[in-house]
Amino acid sequence: MRLPTPTTVHSEEEPHKIEKMKRVIRRIKFESELDLNFGERVADRAYGQKLLSCIQCGTCSATCPLAHYMDYTPRKIIAMTREGFKEEVLNSLTIWLCASCYSCYVQCPRQIHITDVMYTLKREAIQMGFHPKRLPIPILAQEFYKRVLKDGRNTESWLLVSLYLRTNPFIMLREAILGLKLFLRGRLTIGREHVKRRDQLHTILEHKKGEAPL
Ligand code: SF4
Ligand code: SF4
């Protein structure tokens, strides 16, 4: 019996595996690939935060209650933002996990308002469509904002339906019984709620165009 040589292909999948193993992936970026104005832009939009004054002491990361779950710690986010790692920062989970507890800001020896920086990064990520596609947090923020813009009020039942449709419709089926119970106890409305003079609201918003947060 002839023994297979090490290069023998045993199944259709193996050529793919071998190709994958052969592929060399570059894990660093060249300066030409960075967005060098990104840090300045974010600092301006975050009410002029002085990102360059960050001394990378790591106090913000040490004090952050959610740092263990983040893909980049707050210290790294500040460093990457000012160096122009736009895609990595805007695609990160960190900005969406930030719970706005302000602990980092209170402890920062340079008084950098990291929470505002995180908010600015969230807005940038939504505007540029960078956030992870089915991550509920940015979608919830978008849908909430859309409803308030349109009606001046938010209707929870409608918000939940649009959230589930854009993230995972199966959860809607799972939660249907709970929704029904809440409805029967008068805790959930089905009809769309809105302010009386929506026209006035829309006129105000028209004047504020360009300042919209999302
Ligand atoms: S605590 Fe302030 S100075 Fe220290 S790394 Fe964080 S942002 Fe920079
Ligand atoms: S504001 Fe955000 S980044 Fe700062 S400590 Fe709280 S959760 Fe962490």
Image (cartoon, helix red, strand yellow):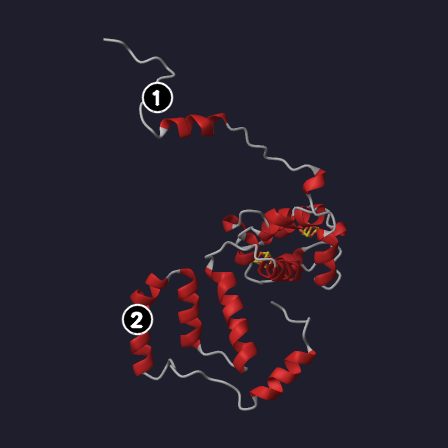
Residue lying at the far bottom of the rendered structure? 196
What type is the residue that disc 2 sits on?
Ala
Q: Quadrant of residue 11?
A: top left
Give neighbour class at mark 2: few <14, some 14-19, many 20+ (Cα, 10 Å).
few
Label 2: element kind = helix
Identify which residue, 95 or 198, lies in the foreground: 198
Identify which residue, 175 or 212, lies in the foreground: 212
Quadrant in which the N terminus is drawn: top left
Q: Quadrant of residue 7?
A: top left
Q: What is the CA distance from the residue labelled 1 to the residue labelled 2?
A: 51 Å
Q: Disc number at residue 176?
A: 2
Residue lying at the far front of the rendered structure? 12
Q: Position of residue 123 (x, y in %)?
A: 61, 62
| 33 in relation to 59, above or below | above
Mark 1 C-beta to ligand 2 under 8 Å:
no
Residue drawn at x 70%, y 57% as measured from the top left: 42
Label 1: element kind = loop
In the rendered picture of this protein, how many numbered marks are placed on residues?
A: 2
Image-based side of 55 in relation to 89, left or right:
right
Give the foreground label among 1 and 2: 1
Residue labelled with disc 1 = 9
Residue drawn at x 29%, y 77% as measured from the top left: 181
Residue drawn at x 56%, y 87% as measured from the top left: 198
Q: Quadrant of residue 99?
A: bottom right
